[in-house]
Image (tube, helix red, strand yellow):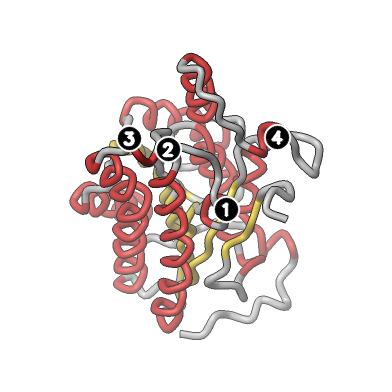
Amino acid sequence: MAIADVSTRSVAELVSLAGRAAVVTGAAQGLGRAMARRLAEAGASVLIGDLNGDLARDAAAELSEDLGRKVVSTAMDVSDSRSVAAAAEIATRQFGGLDIWVNNAGVYPNIPLLEMTEQVWDRVMDVNLKGVFLGAQEAARRMIAGGRSGVIINVVSTAGFRGVAPGVSAYVASKHGVRGATRQMALELAPHGIRVLGVAPTFCETEGNMAALAALAERDVGVEIPATLTSLLGRVGVPDDIARVVLFCASDMSVFMTGSTLLADAGETI
């Protein structure tokens, strides 16, 4: 299936997601919620999936009211194939199909390598890496079955390009894996007209990140996260900085791109 030539479309048409259906995982708060908001603002119907079903429901209600779009929610465990399939079924049933899937959910425990347990390591891989596999697989199956091209967006991290700080070996390993998986998925899904892109955020001020920093301070753990100290662009990132890049990837502005991971890092990895 060839990707369309969109050269004659206006900028407004290229950015518009009207008539498209999206799923964003881990979207009850933080980066995911900002992504869901921008996709809905651009015209997409959106399903917010999150392990915390109550927060997901609240987020969906707020976005639906604010933007006048169809936004629904479901409790979702991205490490459980049945839960992922159930979320995809809800989106397909509610919206009539599936065009965009954003694998955003992730965990970020801070435990030194020598103290890391097998259980914690496995949990990070289950959520951060297997969750991307399960989400992408389910999304691609739905897109192909519906005869629709689409785009899968995997949230990587600057940790997918480098080491970060002591205590995040599992996270760094998982995000390097997501970056590699993005390239391979793009190769395998291109014949079906499905694009796969990665977005790699730097540290942003989210509820989860700020709580993690506070917990480290209470433990008197001196962890330096470069982006919290300096930025070539003069400030630390906020969720919408990343959401706008995701919108670009989801829209036809990026229709000739697949397999790339876009750095949204204020120059951190230069």
**Which element carries disc 1, helix, strand or loop?**
strand
Local packing at callout 4 (Cα closer than 10 Å; few below 14, some 14-19, many 20+) is some
In which quadrant is the C terminus drawn? bottom right
At horizontal 66% and vertical 32% (from top left) the residue drawn is 228
**Which element carries disc 4, helix, strand or loop?**
loop
Q: Sequence-wise, which precedes: disc 2 or disc 4?
A: 2
Cα distance between the residues tagged 4 and 1: 15 Å
Cα distance between the residues tagged 3 and 1: 27 Å
Q: Mark 4 points at which residue?
A: 236
Q: Which mark is residue 115?
A: 3
Depth check: give the residue in front, 17 or 155.
155
At horizontal 58% and vertical 80% (from top left) the residue drawn is 4
Cα distance between the residues tagged 3 and 2: 15 Å
**Which element carries disc 3, helix, strand or loop?**
helix
Q: Picture coordinates of residue 124 (x, y %)?
A: 33, 44
**Is the residue under label 1 in contact with that under label 3 (CB below 8 Å)?**
no
Instruction: Inspect the image, locate mark 1, and give the three-letter code of the amino acid beneath it.
Output: Ala
Q: Name the residue under label 2.
A: 108
Q: Sequence-wise, which precedes: disc 3 or disc 4?
A: 3
Q: Which of marks 3 and 2 is in front?
A: 3
Local packing at callout 3 (Cα closer than 10 Å; few below 14, some 14-19, many 20+) is few
Cα distance between the residues tagged 3 and 4: 30 Å
Instruction: Inspect the image, locate mark 2, and give the three-letter code of the amino acid beneath it.
Output: Tyr
Q: Residue 200 carries which label?
A: 1
Cα distance between the residues tagged 1 and 2: 15 Å
**Which element carries disc 2, helix, strand or loop?**
loop
Local packing at callout 1 (Cα closer than 10 Å; few below 14, some 14-19, many 20+) is many
Q: Which mark is residue 50?
A: none
Q: Sequence-wise, which precedes: disc 1 or disc 2?
A: 2
In which quadrant is the N terminus drawn? bottom left
Task: Classify residue 102 as left or right of residue 8.
Answer: left
Q: Picture coordinates of residue 145 (x, y %)?
A: 29, 72
